[in-house]
């Protein structure tokens, strides 16, 4: 009996030792609530997205009107110093109040104000305009509408004017200067007309024989 009691005490001691070993060595201690780390929020698309680069300012434009005035002031009442024509490509250096500056600033006289050439942004387009055949004829007619004998030779004048402009021998400004072809008194026995291209010197004269279609110089 005594021996059995001793064995029972021994088994209880072994069981207690095993339980203590589990509690102190095997079981992971729980963290106290105030010691728990705060989890970082999961990154969102907005957080990961890189900032978008700034869109470059467009400076290249095309004239989108048949005849666009160039002025030295940002005002419709300012007198046009020259004109641009539909399809002309320009560089706008500055935009302000609906106007585009297309030249550097300059001073006409010492002590005077700085001025520059300006055009209305409403007359410009970022894409090159498409000019139809009908519209081209309308534009060319406006260039030569004061030609001598226009009713007789309008088709020939339109054809040659378009050719000279397309080949960059003449510009619309050249036809604006005289408002069309002028009858030459030098060739009395021929139906010859002339226009100045690139200047107003004799060497700048271009002649057209409307009967043969010949284009020649002085």
Image: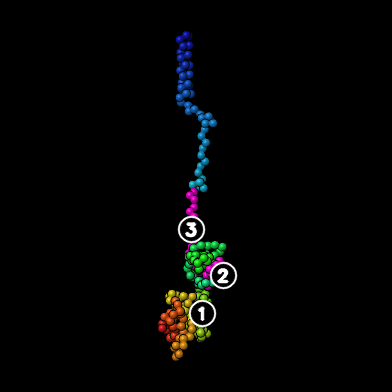
Residue identifier under label 1: 179
- Residue depth check, mark 2 versus mark 3: number of the one nearer the observer: 2
Which mark lies nearer to you, 1 or 3?
A: 1
Q: Earlier in the sequence, mark 2 or mark 1?
A: 2
Q: Please say if 151 is above or below 100.
A: below
Tell me if mark 2 has few (under 14), some (14-19) or many (20+) residues whose alpha carbon lies within 10 angstroms of its own. Answer: few
The magenta stretch spans residue 213: no
Give the residue pinned by disc 3.
56
| Foreground residue among 92 and 79 | 79
In percent of width and height, residue 183 lies at 48, 85
Residue for point 51% across, 84% down: 148
* Tag 2 residue: 78
Q: Is residue 55 magenta?
A: yes
Q: Residue at image x 53%, y 69%?
A: 71
Kindly give the residue lying farthest to the bottom in the view shown: 189
Residue at (49% x, 27% y) in the render: 29
CA–CA distance between discs 2 and 3?
A: 31 Å
């Amino acid at each position: 009996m005594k021996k059995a009691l001793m064995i029972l005490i021994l088994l209880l001691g072994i069981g207690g030792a095993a339980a203590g070993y589990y509690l102190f060595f095997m079981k992971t201690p729980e963290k106290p609530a105030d010691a728990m780390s705060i989890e970082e929020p999961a990154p969102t698309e907005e957080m990961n997205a890189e900032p978008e680069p700034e869109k470059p300012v467009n400076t290249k434009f095309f004239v989108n009107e048949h005849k666009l005035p160039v002025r030295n002031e940002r005002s419709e009442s300012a007198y046009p110093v020259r004109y641009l024509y539909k399809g002309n490509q320009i560089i706008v250096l500055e935009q302000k109040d609906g106007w585009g500056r297309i030249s550097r600033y300059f001073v006409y006289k010492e002590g005077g104000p700085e001025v520059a050439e300006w055009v209305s942004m409403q007359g410009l387009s970022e894409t090159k305009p498409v000019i139809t055949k009908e519209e081209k004829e309308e534009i060319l007619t406006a260039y030569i509408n004061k030609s001598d004998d226009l009713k007789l030779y309008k088709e020939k004048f339109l054809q040659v004017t378009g050719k000279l402009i397309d080949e960059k021998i003449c510009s619309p400004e050249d036809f604006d200067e005289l408002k069309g072809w002028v009858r030459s008194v030098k060739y009395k026995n021929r139906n010859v007309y002339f226009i100045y291209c690139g200047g107003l010197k004799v060497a700048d004269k271009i002649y057209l024989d409307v009967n043969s279609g010949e284009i020649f110089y002085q």
